[in-house]
Amino acid sequence: MAHEELPPINITPGAIRFNTDSMKLEYFRIGMEGGNSSSYAGIGTVAAGEWVQITTDTPDVQTGGTRGVFSGGFTPGSSPGNQDVMDYINIATTGNAISFGTLSAGRSALGATSDRTRGLVLGGYTPSNTDTIEFFTFASTGSRADFEDLTFARRYPTGSSNGTRGLIAGGYTSNYVEEIEYVTIQSAAEAVDFGNLATDATDRVAVCSQTKSVIAGGEDGSGRITSIEYVMTSTLGNGADYGDLTAARRGHGGACNSTRGVWMGGDNPGAQNTIDYVEFASLGDALDFGDLSTAAGRRQGHVSSPTRGICAGGFTNSNVIQFIQLMSKGDSIDYGDLTRTVTEENAGASNGHGGLG
């Protein structure tokens, strides 16, 4: 008896199935270039398209909500002054930070970048400039490990990410730094040259969307600066003019979701309470957002979720953590305290910032 050809199956785009081989949820999408129809015995032919695994690396799945991790810093009067301590918070709640683990050595003046699962701690001071990059897994406390190295040792760099690529920009050696370099966050390898900032400066702070890294303020040879510049994170190249902050300052906190970037506090020369913001969709000068309830000096740690921005510590010898609602202009609110008092850039990384969508 001849086998009867069964008619094609119409699968609705967006249909979900559980793959018993991979033990993962998948959804169906069609119209893929070069897609082929597939035949299944006793079932028929499925129109051109494919089943795609549904990602399970969201903060809710990985860490029970967006997690922020603060690493290192400097504590005056302690021995050693450079700290190896790592703390974490769940950004959606309030309360004091909890111990996450330790860095390989005490470091201050660090930068950070991250994707959904991994945070990178960049450069710093030990008490000399270092090119060290270490990484940790957000879901696993105590998970710090060596990554590779920056192209050169520096302190006070700033970091950003589009979820795949992490950028490291600016900083200080014995001179102000203009270089930008990048790493692929899930691939441990030496950093690679990306381009140059328009202004060689230290204590700059980056915020990011999925496409742009926007770098603001800092200090160059003339003093504190207001300039904001940007690069397209996925395209190698030099910084281009974006606009200006409402006031010159350095070492402020930065926070972002996919549409808005915010800068908090900083130094000019004393601790500032100013909060500025920009919309990533258009270039232009920053606008007033509100004020910090506690003025925060330079080199704060800072982390973000899609709804909140948080800054912690700073040169005012502070353990204070405070937060803002990113889409609601206004003043900051007390969150809790770090496990220690820190100055000199305790690096902050989260698995829910604006570069991750």
Image (spheres, grey):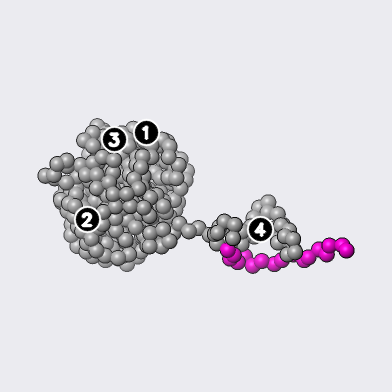
Visible residue check, residue 255: no
Identity, as a three-letter code, of the amino acid under mark 4 = Gly
C-alpha gap between disc 1 and disc 3: 10 Å
- Give the numbered dot on residue 151: 1
Label located before the other in sequence (4 or 2)? 4
The one of 218 and 349 positioned closer to us in this rendering:
349
Residue 303 coordinates in the image, percent (x, y):
31, 55
Residue on which the image places disc 2: 338
C-alpha gap between disc 3 and disc 4: 49 Å
The secondary structure making up most of the magenta span is: loop
Residue 3 part of the magenta-drawn span: yes
At label 4, counting other C-alpha atoms closer than 10 Å, the crowd grade (few under 14, some 14-19, many 20 or more) is some
C-alpha gap between disc 2 and disc 3: 25 Å
Residue 261 coordinates in the image, percent (x, y):
35, 56
Dot 1 and dot 3 residues touching (CB under 8 Å):
no
Residue on which the image places disc 3: 130
Identity, as a three-letter code, of the amino acid under mark 3 = Thr
Residue 35 coordinates in the image, percent (x, y):
68, 54
| Point 17% across, 40% down: residue | 80
In the image, taking residue 116 as reference, residue 32 lies left or right, namely right
C-alpha gap between disc 2 and disc 1: 31 Å
In the image, taking residue 181 as reference, residue 3 lies left or right, namely right
C-alpha gap between disc 4 and disc 2: 50 Å
Q: Which residues are magenta?
A: 1-18
On screen, residue 322 above or below 75: below
On screen, residue 342 above or below 52: above
Residue on which the image places disc 4: 49
| Point 29% across, 40% down: residue | 104
Front: mark 2 or 3: 2
On screen, residue 280 above or below 152: below
Residue 192, quarter of picture: top left
